[in-house]
């Protein structure tokens, strides 16, 4: 029995131990389940928080997008609102400058122009900064003729430099290719900004432009541009922050110099966009040298001329009419000042057949009632804007199988997105307010020269001359062009004096001589102008020819440029 009792006791202890272990295991399992449940609850909570945060982030992102769009819309509106009256101020001042003025009046007009141009520069800086910050700045790749670019900049800025008592000099490396590939507009913008900056901080000194070839290979050239001045210089501390937005040196912030502090920041952003480098070397009181380096692609020097000839050959075989083309323009603009200004500018260019309307609906009605050579369409107008009017005009042309009329957008909003909208609506080109008489003239010539009525050259005649060889190295066409260039400007001036003085007989003779000389070289459009002036003079109505006089020089320059390209080829 004792043995049995002992065995029972051992079994009881074993059972108790097993029970105790099972109880502890159960308790541990319950603790683990409880911990897992807590962790699961935390995970669910975290998921809810994450979803909430995602919603908040999406809302914040959408707010940022909306804010960006609102900012762009605001800037676009402000740009248009500022540029529209500026166009009136600058345009009317330009027209006034072309009229007889006393010295005091000329000085007053000059002040108006300078102030308006300064305001325009400030607006443009703000727009450029906005486009760069939004990533909307796009490069426009094309031909870069550095020598021509530098010459243009010198012609543009030398009066300003001399006004400040400074001398402007240029040193351009002759080993740089004649034609390169890049964004000529942006390179010009950077150089103008740096030169104006150098001139602003220099007095009775020198501003020197230096262009150097740094590297040369089969397909690219690295070019270094330097603008050196003998002005006030920049401290080392200021140099470290100089290319930041709104950053100006302590002396630069003074009212003596003015400015927004955006110019150098924009230059840096544009150089970076072109994958280049920019910097400054300066010592306070000893002048500064701003530099930037760009790698530009090489371009075949004959490509441009060949393309021009190929384009012109499409119009071979066209007969020359003795009568001048009749250019009619439809002007759509709701701003009364701009309408008056553009009509005056067109009259100055010899275009008197102009119909003006104030909104898109009236533009469509006018288009349906009459055929126009060109339409100048404001972007923002009441009732129907320029975009919608253009779409309807293009639709009418398609439905009625009409010839497409060139439509040029006019607007104070020069943002790339707005330009794209104009092109998408069916417009042919874009002219930003404010625009000068020269810009308007070039735009009209560009689109009128694309039509048969105002073709610059009669290419069949030009090619007949070009095929006649001479014994020397020069072509006959080149020699005749030189003779034409030597004689024609003086004859045009004589014709102008005869027309203005009312000497009908002399005007008839000179106009006939100019017409014949132009026809013999295949100069199409300019000869039609001379023909119409000749006809007016024959009829004793020289005054009717006066509006055509201002169109002569641009037409002469366009003809010479076209003949020069053909001659080189």
Image: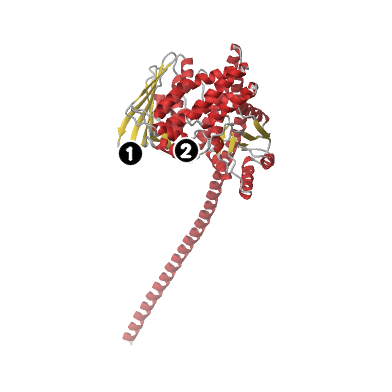
Q: Nearer the viewer, residue 90 or 395?
A: 395
Residue at position x 51%, y 29% from top?
519
- Please give the residue where the numbered disc 1 appears in the rendered image: 219
Q: Residue furthest bottom?
A: 1
Residue 253: give x, y in percent of width and height.
49, 22
Q: CA distance from mark 2 to mark 1?
A: 29 Å
Instruction: Say whether marks 2 and 1 touch (CB < 8 Å).
Output: no
Q: Secondary structure at mark 1?
A: loop
Q: Secondary structure at mark 2?
A: helix
Q: Nearer the viewer, mark 2 or mark 1?
A: 2
Q: Residues within 10 Å of mark 1 (few under 14, many from 20)?
A: few
Q: Residues within 10 Å of mark 2 (few under 14, many from 20)?
A: some
Question: Where is residue 338, by image quadrant?
Answer: top right
Residue 312, numbered label: 2
Residue 245: give x, y in percent of width and height.
48, 31
Q: Quadrant of the C terminus?
A: top left
Q: Is residue 462 above or below residue 485?
A: below
> N-terminal of the two: label 2 or label 1?
1
Residue 427 showing in the rendered view: yes
Q: Quadrant of the N terminus?
A: bottom left
Q: Is residue 349 left or right of residue 174?
A: right
Residue at position x 36%, y 83% from top?
8
Residue 490: give x, y in percent of width and height.
50, 18
Q: Residue furthest top?
A: 103
Residue 249 showing in the rendered view: no
Residue 314: give x, y in percent of width and height.
48, 41
């Amino acid at each position: 029995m004792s043995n049995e009792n002992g065995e029972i006791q051992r079994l009881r202890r074993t059972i108790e131990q097993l029970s105790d272990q099972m109880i502890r295991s159960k308790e541990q399992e319950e603790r683990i389940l409880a911990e897992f449940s807590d962790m699961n609850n935390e995970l669910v909570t975290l998921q809810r928080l994450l979803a909430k945060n995602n919603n908040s982030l999406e809302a914040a992102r959408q707010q940022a997008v909306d804010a960006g769009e609102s900012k762009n819309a605001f800037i676009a509106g402000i740009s248009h609102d500022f540029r529209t009256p500026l166009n009136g101020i600058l345009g009317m001042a330009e027209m006034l400058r072309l009229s007889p003025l006393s010295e005091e009046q000329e000085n007053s007009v000059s002040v108006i122009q300078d102030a308006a141009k300064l305001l325009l520069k400030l607006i443009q800086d703000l727009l450029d900064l906005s486009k760069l910050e939004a990533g909307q700045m796009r490069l426009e790749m094309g031909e870069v003729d550095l020598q021509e670019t530098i010459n243009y900049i010198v012609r543009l800025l030398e009066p300003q430099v001399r006004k400040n008592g400074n001398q402007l000099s240029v040193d351009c490396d002759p080993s740089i290719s004649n034609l390169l590939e890049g964004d000529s507009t942006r390179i010009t913008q950077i150089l103008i900004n740096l030169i104006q900056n150098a001139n602003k901080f220099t007095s009775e000194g020198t501003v020197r432009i230096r262009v150097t070839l740094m590297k040369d290979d089969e397909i690219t050239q690295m070019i270094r541009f330097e603008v050196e001045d003998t002005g006030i210089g920049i401290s080392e501390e200021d140099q470290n922050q100089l290319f930041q937005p709104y950053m100006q040196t302590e002396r630069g912030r003074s009212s003596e110099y003015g400015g927004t502090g955006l110019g150098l920041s924009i230059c840096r952003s544009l150089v970076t966009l072109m994958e280049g480098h920019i910097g400054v070397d300066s010592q306070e009181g000893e002048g500064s040298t701003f530099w930037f380096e760009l790698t530009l692609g090489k371009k075949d020097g004959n490509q441009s001329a060949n393309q021009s000839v190929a384009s012109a050959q499409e119009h071979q075989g066209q007969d020359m009419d003795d009568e001048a083309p009749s250019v009619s323009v439809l002007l759509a603009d709701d701003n009364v000042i701009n309408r008056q200004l553009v009509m005056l500018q067109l009259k100055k260019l010899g275009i008197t057949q102009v119909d003006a309307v104030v909104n898109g609906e009236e533009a469509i009605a006018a288009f349906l009632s009459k055929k126009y050579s060109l339409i100048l369409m404001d972007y923002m107008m009441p009732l129907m804007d320029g975009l919608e009017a253009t779409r309807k005009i293009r639709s009418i042309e398609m439905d009625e199988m009409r010839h497409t009329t060139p439509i040029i957008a006019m607007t104070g909003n020069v943002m790339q997105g707005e330009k794209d909208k104009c092109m998408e609506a069916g417009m042919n080109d874009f002219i930003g307010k404010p625009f000068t008489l020269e810009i308007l003239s070039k735009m009209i010539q560009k689109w009128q020269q694309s039509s048969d009525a105002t073709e610059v050259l009669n290419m069949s005649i030009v090619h007949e001359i070009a095929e006649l060889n001479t014994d020397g190295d020069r072509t006959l066409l080149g020699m005749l062009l030189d003779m034409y260039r030597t004689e024609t400007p003086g004859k045009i001036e004589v014709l102008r004096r005869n027309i203005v003085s009312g000497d009908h007989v002399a005007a008839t003779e000179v106009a006939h001589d100019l017409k014949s000389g132009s026809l013999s070289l295949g100069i199409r459009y300019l000869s039609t102008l001379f023909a119409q002036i000749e006809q007016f003079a024959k009829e004793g109505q020289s005054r009717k020819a006066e509006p055509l006089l201002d169109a002569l020089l641009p037409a002469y320059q366009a003809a010479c440029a076209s003949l020069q390209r053909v001659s080189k080829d």
